[in-house]
Image (cartoon, helix red, strand yellow):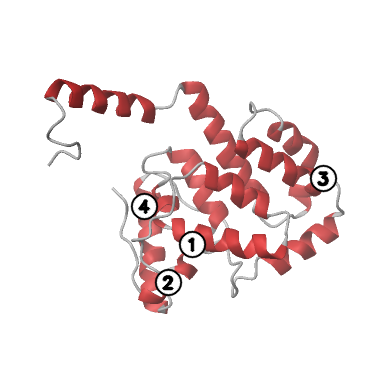
Amino acid sequence: MSPLPATIPVTARTRIRATARRRTVPTPDAAERRVLLLRLLSLLLRYPDHELTDGRPRLAAAVAAPPPSRAAAELAAFMAWFTADEPEELGRRYAEMFDPRGDGSLHLTHYLNADIRRRGSALLALKRRYRAAGWNIEGAELPDHLPVVLEFAALAGPGPGEAPLRQHRRGLELIHRAITDTGSPYGHLLAALRTLLPPAEDTEPSRHSGAHPEADR
C-alpha cells in the first residue's frame, strides 16, 4: 500500500518518491565524511590507553578536517578537553563514566535485554551479522560494545552497517542521557552520534520488556 494519500495524482506521487530517494543517497564526499565521523567516534569512545593518548595530535587533526556541522562541532568540543588532560586522568574519568554494570554502559544489548539468555541471543545475532559482512571481530570486546558497532557501521556502510545502531537507538538515548546528567565531556561524542541517526522510535522495545530485535533488513 502506498504511504502517500490517494488524492495525490499518480504523476505527483511518482515525483515525490523520486525526490525522497534522491535525498537519501549521499554524495561521495558526504559518504566519506560520514565514515570519517563514525571512525572517529569509534576510536574516541574506546578506553584511552597509551596508544590512543599518544595519537591525540593526529586525532585532533582528523577532527578538524570535516567541514562545519553539528557533529563536527561536538567532536571539536570533546577534543578540546581530551587533548588538554593528563592520560592518567583520562583513564580514570573513562572508567568512572562507562561502568559496564551501570547506566553508562557502552554495551548496547544491556539496555534491551534484562534476561541473560535473551542478551546472549542478541550478541550471537550481531556476531552473525558481522561474519555475513565478511568482518571478524578482533580483541576482547563483545560485539555490542558501542565502539565495535561504530567501527562496523563505518566499514559496512549506512544500510546494513548502521542497522545495529538503528536497532539500539533507544539504548543510545539512555547512554546520552546518563552521560549528559553527569556533565562528562563524553556527552559531546554521543551528541555527535545522535546527529547522524534518525530519531528514536517510541515503539522500540524497552529493556524491561525482555525483547530483542532481529537483524534489521
Label 1 close to label 2 by CB (< 8 Å): yes
Residue 132 percent across, percent down from the top left: 34, 48
The amino acid type found where label 1 is placed reads Gly
Q: Mark 2 = which residue? A: 207
Q: Which mark is residue 129?
A: 4
Label 4 close to label 3 by CB (< 8 Å): no
How many residues crowd mark 2 within 10 Å: few (<14), some (14–19), many (20+)?
A: some
Quadrant where the N terminus sits is top left
Position of residue 203 in the picture relative to residue 104 (left or right): left
Residue 124 percent across, percent down from the top left: 38, 64
The amino acid type found where label 2 is placed reads Arg
Q: Mark 1 = which residue? A: 171
Toward the viewer: 143 or 15? Answer: 15
- Residue at x-position 32% and y-position 51%: 216
Give the mark toward the camera: 4 or 3.
3
Q: Alpha carbon of mark 4 to alpha carbon of mark 3: how far?
A: 35 Å
Q: Alpha carbon of mark 1 to alpha carbon of mark 2: how far?
A: 8 Å
Q: Earlier in the sequence, mark 4 or mark 2?
A: 4
Q: Earlier in the sequence, mark 4 or mark 1?
A: 4
Q: Mark 3 = which residue? A: 83
Q: Alpha carbon of mark 4 to alpha carbon of mark 2: how far?
A: 21 Å
